[in-house]
Amino acid sequence: MRRFLSFPNLELLVCAKMDPLSTLTKIRKIISNTADRELVKLILDLQKEIFAIESRNLELASELASLKPQLDLPARMHTRPQSGYYFLEGDNVPFCPKCWESRGAAIHLQAPVSAGGKTRRECRVCKETYWDAAVTKGRSQAHHA
């Protein structure tokens, strides 16, 4: 879609997908010979606004890129029926079921500690303790304390 904007002694072709900074540079070249101070001031003010918008756009794009993995996390989290813990694809350290199910927080459980033929894991955040039954046939069962 193309249309023309008309100003006294100035005609601009406006395209549906234009680069604001490039367009602004063209405008500045066109008006460089004008004596209309008000027009020059408006163009400079517009330039400042465009730079502010471009800067904010870069900030938001960066924030979105950093949040994207968190948005994808639920699809990559799964349980292993033999343990009852949650695991992330490619990560063999279990996550706290209580933290994940109640708040959606992916908190790794601390390293296992053996005690009396059982293995205990604790969550450093919610302080929940999980006991794994004695290993039989290569599998263990997690239980809340």
Image: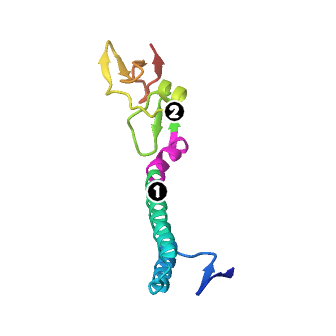
- Of marks 2 and 1, which one's residue comes earlier in the chain? 1
Q: Nearer the viewer, residue 19 or 52?
A: 52
Q: Is residue 85 above or below residue 40?
A: above
Q: Which mark is residue 26?
A: none
Residue at the image position 61 percent from the left and 84 percent from the top: 8
Residue at the image position 37 percent from the left and 21 percent from the top: 122
Mark 1, secondary structure of its residue: helix
Residue at the image position 45 percent from the left and 87 percent from the top: 33
The amino acid on which the numbered mark 2 sits, given as a three-letter code, is: Gly
Specify whether residue 139 is painted magenta: no
Q: Indicate the position of residue 20 as horizontal and vertical percent values.
A: 52, 72
Q: Is residue 48 above or below residue 81?
A: below
Q: Which mark is residue 56?
A: 1
Q: Nearer the viewer, residue 42 or 111?
A: 42
Q: Residues within 10 Å of mark 2 (few under 14, many from 20)?
A: few
Q: Quadrant of residue 1?
A: bottom right
The amino acid on which the numbered mark 1 sits, given as a three-letter code, is: Arg
Q: Indicate the position of residue 43 as horizontal and vertical percent values.
A: 49, 72
Q: Is residue 106 left or right of residue 113?
A: right
Q: Is residue 35 above or below residue 49?
A: below
Q: Is residue 124 above or below residue 60?
A: above
Give the main secondary structure, helix, strand or loop, of the magenta stretch.
helix
Q: Which residue is mark 2?
A: 104
Query: Which one is closest to the eye, mark 2 or mark 1?
Result: 1
Q: Which residues are magenta?
A: 64-77
Residue at the image position 43 percent from the left and 50 percent from the top: 66
Q: Is residue 87 left or right of residue 13?
A: left
Q: Residues within 10 Å of mark 1 (few under 14, many from 20)?
A: few
Mark 2, secondary structure of its residue: loop
Q: CA distance from mark 2 to mark 1?
A: 29 Å
Q: Quadrant of residue 11?
A: bottom right
